[in-house]
Image (cartoon, rainbow, N blue to C red):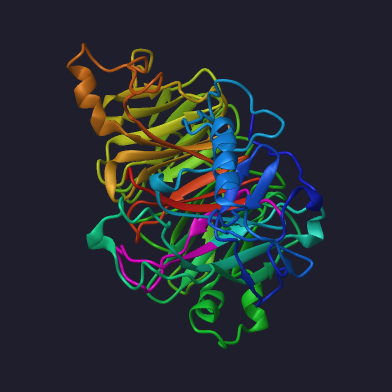
Amino acid sequence: MAKRPGEFTEGDLSNLKNGERAGSTAKLGEATTPVKDGMGEFEDPYEDEMESDGEVVEAETESEMEEDEDDEAMDVDTEAYRISRPQEPLGKDEVLEPDPSAFHMLHNMGTKWPCLSFDIIPDNLGDNRQTYPATVYLVTGTQASKPKDNEITVMKLSSLSRMKQDPEDSDEDSDSDDDDNDDDPILESRHIPVSTTTNRIRTSSTPSTRLAAAMLETGNVNIYNISPHFTSLESPGHAIPPSANQPLASFSMHRGVEGYAIDWSPLTPGTRLLTGDNAGKIFHTTATDGGKFTTDGAAFTGHTSSVEEIQWSPAERTVFASASADGTVKIWDVRQRNRRHVLSVDVSSSDVNVASWNATTQHLLATGADDGVWAVWDLRTFSASSNSNITPVASFTWHQQPITSVEWNPNDDTVVAVGSADGTVTLWNLAVEEDAEEDGGYNSAVKGAGDAPDQLMFEHYCEGVREVHWMRQMPGVVVATGEKGFSVFKTISV
């Protein structure tokens, strides 16, 4: 069945500091502490004094401090805690805190409403950025408790500083004035009112226009020109005309059937859009020479359940893949007049929720399913005659709950980010597979440190994670959205 996250109320979520309104600027907490029942800001662990009602409390004597440190040392467990496979449940007063030495950067942002989907907007700040503070532009849509409170939000996250490290452990070559920035992270946002939840949103940029296509809970598909909103964030003071908040096009070809599958063609930016719904139908929308959008009247059919994911081929302009709750991945060509798939392979006995086509090694497709398994498939092994003997290149059963997101690293074709309903974002390096082959071939039972597979590089807590994306212009930076907001981080392992 199709993914349908539960509703959340306003009280379940932490609001942005100072509130958030159209054109507003709000401060972000520098980072947050993952806790069992929510997200809270990090406190300064180096403070020697506390202020209470304007009075300064004197620091303890040296002997008292030593005794306190000994007591605290007995209560603090510094071992890694496997969030997806906890050794034992957290106690009532226990919390999880990230290890600063494991991150180059970590910032968490609370939002008023959950965001089921987002996309990263390419910016004009350059590629292969390595310096701090960092800046990220996003577009997202909300899941508010009341339909009228929903919006599509274009965001700028700036002054994202690097994690403070122990000077003895830091890389001297990375020290710079930029790295030492102590300013608070800043969120600036621009809003487009919508009257329903955004199930999934994707962007496509041309030299002149930035577009965002949204799959709405009503079954409609809206296309927006978010260039004015982006420019307003890029150049403060730039006015956004009221007409910019209206969609360029709105389509109802899904006839009230909601869906989650949507993708712009990477080879023809802003001109080809695919959308799939819970009835198993896929529609192809194209831009005309005059800039208008039109949808083919006939749907692509073949799935027996909801279409959960669509991915255009990174190499063939007319080819795309779809993943479905019927457990299959199908390959299609928009030139097929009968609107039927070319290939179909059974990849899971449960719903296939997500898929990602490797942009560099273009015969590899990663999938994630409801049973917690994510796998990598070699499309060259797919055939029209038989699919019963096709096995994945790699398959991992580490996660015990549904996979909600999977994406190849655009800057390293062996690295994958995976999001799961178990509350984690995991990073994997499939290049390690070569070492496992020396022991008799790869399988998901090959173990690395502890009970983890060798390929598992990192595990990050993100409560109710919905979607994960790599920041192409800043290699190694990952952005995730979950029940309580967004997490932006870069680990030392990538």
Q: Is residue 158 left or right of residue 249?
A: left
User: In the picture, residue 365 is in which quadrant?
Assistant: top left
Q: Relative to residue 449, is residue 8 depicted above or below?
A: below
Is residue 423 visible from the viewing direction of this image? no
Is residue 448 visible from the viewing direction of this image? yes
Which residue corresponds to the image point at 59% horizontal and 70% vertical from the top-left?
Answer: 248
| Residue 122 part of the magenta segment | yes
| Residue 289 part of the magenta segment | no
Q: Is residue 431 left or right of residue 479?
A: left
Q: Indicate the position of residue 12 as horizontal and vertical percent values.
A: 77, 47
Q: How many marks?
A: 0
Q: Indicate the position of residue 44 as horizontal and vertical percent values.
A: 57, 57
Which residue corresponds to the image point at 38% horizontal and 13% vertical from the top-left?
Answer: 388
Q: Relative to residue 333, is residue 52 depicted above or below?
A: below
Which residue corresponds to the image point at 39% horizontal and 68% vertical from the top-left?
Answer: 180
Most common secondary structure along the magenta stretch: loop
Quarter holding the N terminus? top right
Of the pair 341 and 487, the residue shown nearer to us: 487
User: In the picture, residue 31 is in which quadrant?
Assistant: bottom right
Q: Indicate the position of residue 494 as horizontal and vertical percent values.
A: 32, 45
Q: Relative to residue 313, is residue 85 depicted above or below?
A: above
Of the pair 162 and 233, the residue shown nearer to us: 162
User: In the picture, residue 167 is in which quadrant?
Assistant: bottom left
Q: Indicate the position of residue 374 as horizontal and vertical percent values.
A: 44, 28
Q: Give the magenta part as a residue range.
A: 113-138
Which residue corresponds to the image point at 57% horizontal and 59% vertical from the top-left?
Answer: 47
